Amino acid sequence: MTPGRAAYPTHRAARTSTVRTAAVHGTGLIGTSVALALASRGVTVHLVDHDPEQARTAAALGAGTDAAPEGPVDLVVVAVPPAHVASTLAEVMGRGVGRGYIDVASVKGGPRRELEALGLDLSSYIGTHPMSGRERSGPLAGTADLFEGRPWVLTPTRDTDTEVLNLALELVALCRAVPVVMEADAHDRAVALVSHMPHLVSSMVAARLQDAEETAVRLCGQGIRDVTRIAASDPRMWIDILSANPGPVAELLAAVSADLDETVEALRALQSSDEDKRRLGAAGIEDVLRRGNAGQVRVPGKHGSAPTAYEIVAVLIDDQPGQLARIFGDADRAGVNIEDVRIEHATGQQAGLVQLMVEPAAAARLSAALRERGWAIRQ
């Protein structure tokens, strides 16, 4: 159907900015998670996917119904790969499927320019991006709490209808996320820095393990697990994402590449018999490490606040049911709040090290309390 022609009546008078009905197009991880969150809060959700089996799976999970809506819904959520956002939006907007339209793709500038090139009235549309995800994909990976406490970027323009902005804000609230307003291209540069480029670097590090000797791989500890965790994501999904934002990612990788070249040169200098060269090499390594320190402290801490230097209380545990519950219960009885937690698994053993992050003033008290209750504390 030609964009602009509506299959549904599009009466615009006396409308309210309340999401009671929604249509989610695309039932992968993000689309299904949005649908689950909305459905759990009483919104009637209609599910659409190019693969009807995926929509039926999402419906079976309680995300909504795969039946078509009888008329325009309050909000249409387009949750398809970036390359298909514009065509999908043009199709649903052309049919007048909803009062308002958003997409949740991880890239914002390109899809909007594609829509503008189609000559569509974009007053009823706003681009958005929930900053949340998992290594798994598909409807079975969806969860209603995926977005809780996470930033959700909104990219309105001067043409965006206030009602549509309010609908989008209500959606964010229903998903219990935190709205962040940005300009579309600024968003794309930002996600290139904090998401897209790190994913490629993680994959490059993980690729070094592919043909490594088994004896070396068995030495993997928490550090390599932390660095390579996101490398487990679906390559097909990431090809779609990176294809929609190649420029900013390439610029960042070029800067990383320059740092790598300088670091390699510094490491080579450390092998020299010339003391001056070794001194310069050490200075080069120190420079990149200190710049890393300076960047790391800018990563937001708990609840988005400035990062806090927590004390770590390390506890040795067996890999048995109930161990973590016991530790948290003992910490509660000691009156200590666990600010964060990390688990380092022992390779080839049914044991692990739980690192409990607490306020520095509470570390000694927690260590003493856990020792009294029989826990093995490690320095």
Image (tube, rainbow, N blue to C red):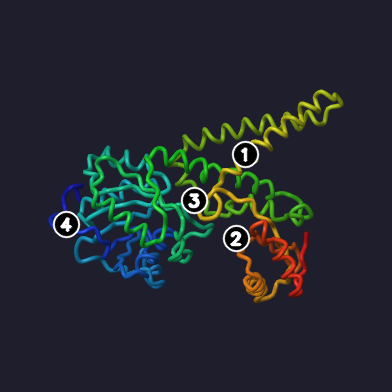
Which residue in the structure is indicated by mark 1? Answer: 294
Q: Amino acid at mark 3?
A: Arg
Using the numbered discs, state the Cα–Cα distance from disc 2 to disc 3 in whole angstroms: 36 Å
Please tell me whether mark 4 or mark 2 is closer to you in this view.
Answer: 2
**First reached walking from the N terminus: tag 4 or tag 1:** 4
User: What residue appears at the point 76 percent right and 33 percent down from the top-left corner?
Assistant: 267
Q: Are marks 4 and 3 in contact (CB under 8 Å)?
A: no
Crowd band around label 2 with a 10 angstrom C-alpha radius: few (<14), some (14–19), many (20+): few
User: What residue appears at the point 49 percent right and 51 percent down from the top-left corner?
Assistant: 236
Crowd band around label 1 with a 10 angstrom C-alpha radius: few (<14), some (14–19), many (20+): few
Which residue in the structure is indicated by mark 4? Answer: 7
Q: Are marks 2 and 3 in contact (CB under 8 Å)?
A: no
Q: Which mark is residue 236?
A: 3
- Assign a secondary structure to mark 3: helix
User: What residue appears at the point 65 percent right and 49 percent down from the top-left corner?
Assistant: 206
**First reached walking from the N terminus: tag 2 or tag 1:** 1
Which residue in the structure is indicated by mark 2? Answer: 339
Crowd band around label 3 with a 10 angstrom C-alpha radius: few (<14), some (14–19), many (20+): few
- Assign a secondary structure to mark 2: loop
Number of labels in the image equals 4
Relative side of 177 to 351, left or right: left
Q: Are marks 4 and 2 in contact (CB under 8 Å)?
A: no
**First reached walking from the N terminus: tag 2 or tag 3:** 3
- Assign a secondary structure to mark 1: helix
